[in-house]
Image (cartoon, coloured by chain):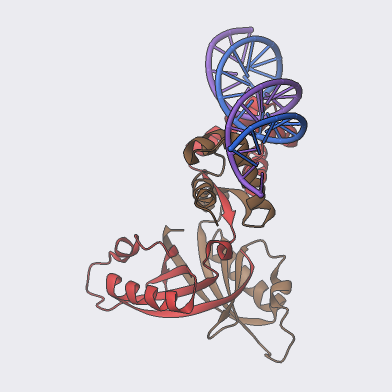
Chain colours: A red, B brown, C blue, D purple
Amino acid sequence: MEAADLRIIDLLREDGRISYTDLGKAVGLSTSAVHQRVRRLEERGIITSYTAQVDPAALGTPLTAFVSVTPLDPRDPDDIPDRLRGIAQIDACYSVAGDSNYLLRVRVGTPQDLEELLSRVRSQGGVSTRTTIVLTTPWE
Amino acid sequence: MEAADLRIIDLLREDGRISYTDLGKAVGLSTSAVHQRVRRLEERGIITSYTAQVDPAALGTPLTAFVSVTPLDPRDPDDIPDRLRGIAQIDACYSVAGDSNYLLRVRVGTPQDLEELLSRVRSQGGVSTRTTIVLTTPWE
DNA sequence: CGTGAAAGCAAGAAGGA
DNA sequence: TCCTTCTTGCTTTCACG
């Protein structure tokens, strides 16, 4: 990938709402040229989306936790992600190599919410869980 | 928080580059009204930033891992986040309650890069590590 | 990749419920 | 306080060189 594209990606990661005009000034290209480059990056799947970052506490979910997930019966077909996909509190799901099969990052409001969520994950996913509470997030 | 603000936040999380005009149509308010609301959400720190999501593989970092971090000497002052902040490959740092003190999410290109990174984390952070490799990311 | 024109959008001022 | 409308200047988009 070219230097201009990398610079564009950097700037768009810093400020996803920057205008193509400013982007052009920053990389030394015309508005249309950067616009075209950005479109190509999007088409090639390099830039996948643009999102607003929101303070979880403001949305009523100040409590973050990581949940390690292991199937109760390892012989079952592994469709755990499909089984868990509908659960809104799970905001990331990683398939991992290690003690457990999956690692989930979840966000909830209170310890009670976490208890309910874990119970739902266990029954709906057919899994056992091991949970690690996040105290603070120095950066993300 | 009001329903309109929540709807605005939802839409901005889905598409961080949506125009205020479209946002206004979607929530049934004028352009200026939503614009004003968005600015207030930003000022109040509810919307913290806008970012482009980029495919890690395209940036040459297809390998994701979680690193549990424990201080070698628990009596030392705990400035581990400060010690690790400069390391670009660490893209999230969580202080956790559990076996270890911190959980890092890291992204690198190759197993060799991971080896180097872990060695740097250990020496620079004054910590021991336990690493879990991510195989796939069903969602994030 | 750049230019230029047309359409669309942002941002501020003024005024009303 | 929060909304709408209006106006001005930018930004985006697209056809073309």
Q: Nearer the viewer, residue B19 or A139?
A: B19
Tell me if I can see residue A109 in this picture. yes
Q: Residue at x 53, y 86 (%)?
A: B99
Occupied quadrant, residue A127: bottom left
Q: Residue at x 49, y 71 (%)?
A: A109
The single residue placed furthest to the left in the displayed view is A76
Q: Nearer the viewer, residue A35 or B4?
A: B4
Say above or below: B103 vs A33.
Answer: below
Q: Position of residue A21 (x, y in %)?
A: 69, 31
Say above or below: A36 vs B88.
Answer: above
Tell me if I can see residue A99 in this picture. no
Q: Position of residue B14 (x, y in %)?
A: 49, 47
Left or right: residue B127 versus residue A89 is right
Looking at the image, how many numbered discs can be counted on the residues?
Answer: 0
Say above or below: A89 vs B59.
Answer: below
Q: Residue at x 65, y 82 (%)?
A: B127
Q: Position of residue B103 (x, y in %)?
A: 57, 74
Say above or below: A52 vs B114.
Answer: above
Q: Position of residue A61 (x, y in %)?
A: 52, 67
Q: Quadrant of the N terminus of chain B?
A: bottom right
